[in-house]
Amino acid sequence: RAKGEGRNRYCFFEPEMGTKIHARRTLELELRKAVEMGDLELYYQPQVESGSRQIAGFEALIRWHHKERGDIPPEEFISVAEDSGLITEIGRWVLEQACLEAMSWPDSIQVAVNVSPVQFRSAKALLSDVRSALLLSGLPAHRLELEITEGILMQDTAANLELLDSLRRMGVHIAMDDFGTGYSSLGYIRRFCFDRIKIDRSFINDVTTSKDSQAVVQAVCGLCSTLGIQTVAEGVENEQQLQFLFDEGCSLIQGYYIARPMAVADLQRLIVDWTAAL
Ligand code: C2E
Ligand code: MG
Ligand code: MG
Ligand code: MG
């Protein structure tokens, strides 16, 4: 941006950069307060089996209700939490809260929790946070699924394999989130023995119109079903997408077409109504 701007040519620290840094710093301080004040909340979005349409699980999605600015989306504050180290504390709270809340759902329904790459890099802390969330809540390990993004696996393969292995030995499930957005190949699916692969929303979004997205979805669903790994489609918004995914053998469906993420207070009703309608 500085390039070709005449007299500003040598100024690579632009005023608006200072403003941006300041805004992030303010957000960080407010987030710290929000953690203390309990202004964070978990919403849950159902994942249903594509054939039977039974609810298999809920993904926990964090919400920040800001007193003055209303709801701030996780895309805006998770990176601030990661840069400031606050994510450790937030991540621990998310794990605990999600496991506790899952205890009041039917045994057949699991809970999926997003884990930041920053948490994943502190293997010991993550293992101990997962263990205490399970102990504290009494949730059986097999009802907890951790969602990690493919970026995590880029470096440090041996250490990553070991951490995934330790988590799996505890009995928790591991899903790869946003598959297809990073650099990982289909080979990763096999190497890291994921329980589930979540196909990124961008492919689902145009799966009924784009040949490329169709090819990706077909390849992932085909390979995963051969390997006995479940596939989850995220961001399913209509019946045509659902039908395509079902035909390709995609195991689970998540998206606004089924339900939007909702407050925990609304879940019992959803479970009852949904099950009654099947
Ligand atoms: P994600 O894990 O890939 O979560 C899926 C996102 O897609 C959620 O956005 C969800 O609300 C949205 N979504 C679901 N169905 C549809 C649909 O049909 N259409 C569209 N357009 N969107 C849909 P959300 O809740 O804003 O979260 C965004 C991201 O923030 C998450 O992406 C995840 O990476 C991160 N995040 C959320 N909660 C946590 C958390 O507790 N910890 C960490 N580390 N990250 C979190
Ligand atoms: Mg996720
Ligand atoms: Mg995702
Ligand atoms: Mg995504």
Image (spheres, rainbow, N blue to C red):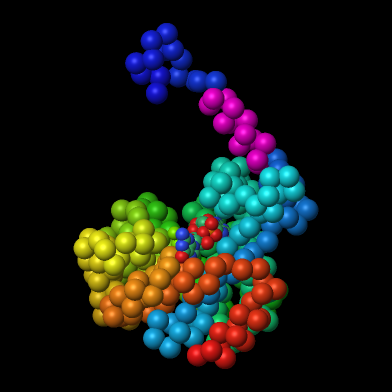
Q: Position of residue 236 (x, y in %)?
A: 42, 69
Q: Position of residue 108 (x, y in %)?
A: 55, 87
Q: Is residue 150 at least partly visible in the picture?
A: yes
Q: Position of residue 103 (x, y in %)?
A: 66, 80
Q: Position of residue 154 (x, y in %)?
A: 36, 53
Image: 174 above or below 24: below
Residue at coordinates 32% horizontally, 62% vertically from top-left?
206
Q: Looking at this rendering, what residue extends furthest in the right direction?
A: 37
Q: Looking at this rendering, what residue extends furthest in the top direction?
A: 7
Image: 48 above or below 83: below
Q: Nearer the viewer, residue 11 or 137?
A: 11
Q: Nearer the viewer, residue 255 or 76?
A: 255
Q: Nearer the viewer, residue 104 or 124?
A: 104
Q: Would residue 151 be found to the left or right of residue 110 on screen?
A: left
Residue 17 covered by magenta stretch: yes
Q: Would residue 186 be found to the left or right of residue 265 on screen?
A: left
